[in-house]
Amino acid sequence: MAKMMRRMGLGILVLCGVAWCGGAWRGMTVRSAPATTVEVKIDNFTFAPGTLTVTAGTTVKWVNRDDIPHTVVSEDKSTFKSKAMDTDDSFTYTFTKPGTYTYFCSIHPKMVGKVVVQ
């Protein structure tokens, strides 16, 4: 009996393998968990996207793609504050509380962005 069940199990595995390899998966919808890290690109004296909406618990990663240093500083200057980031440097902050967080570059104060946490 055990031998027969092992054969049946192997047959099911083979059939499943054939179905998957045969392309049955193409019609399926795959859903993944929401991203926990979102990237903001710093380039050409701008934050992109300029306004970002995320859920509480999301980590935002700012990456400097510009050829000059930039910072990321919360408007209140105490919630988060990066050091000067050279090209390809990054800074991360995890937003745990809902609210609107405006930030800027302390080296270039006209550079502003916003994170809306829901």
Image (spheres, helix red, strand yellow):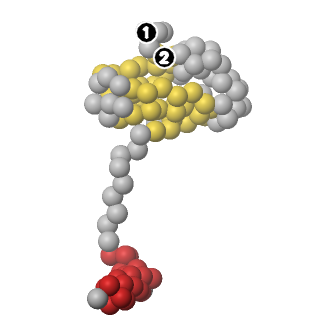
Q: Which mark is residue 93?
A: none
| Callout 1: SS | loop
CA gap, disc 1 to disc 2? Answer: 9 Å
Q: Is residue 58 above or below residue 110?
A: below
Tell me the quarter of the picture where residue 12 sits. Answer: bottom left
Residue pictured at 66% horizontal, 31% vertical? 89
Residue 109: percent from left, percent from top: 55, 15
Which disc number belongs to residue 80? 2
- Relative placement, left or right, of 55 versus 49 is left
Q: Is residue 2 visible?
A: yes
Horizontal and vertical percent position of residue 53: 35, 34
Instruction: Name, please, the residue furthest toward the front.
Output: 1
Q: Quadrant of the C terminus?
A: top left
Mark 2 secondary-structure assignment: loop
Q: Are marks 1 and 2 in contact (CB under 8 Å)?
A: no
Residue under pointer 1: 76
Residue type highlighted by circle 1: Asp
The part of the image, by quadrant, that contains residue 100 is top left
Q: Total marks drawn?
A: 2
- Whether residue 53 is visible: no
Foreground tag (1 vs 2) = 2
Give me the residue at 38% from left, 76% from top: 26
Which quadrant would residue 31 be assigned to in this image? bottom left
Q: In the image, is residue 43 above or below residue 6?
A: above
How crowded pointer 2 is (Cα within 10 Å; few <14, some 14-19, many 20+) is rated as: some
Q: Residue at x 40, y 44 (%)?
A: 35
The quadrant of the rendering that contains the N terminus is bottom left
Question: Are there few (<14), some (14-19), or many (20+) residues within 10 Å of tag 1?
Answer: few
**Which is more toward the observer, 20 or 75?**
20
Check disc 2 and give the amino acid type. Phe
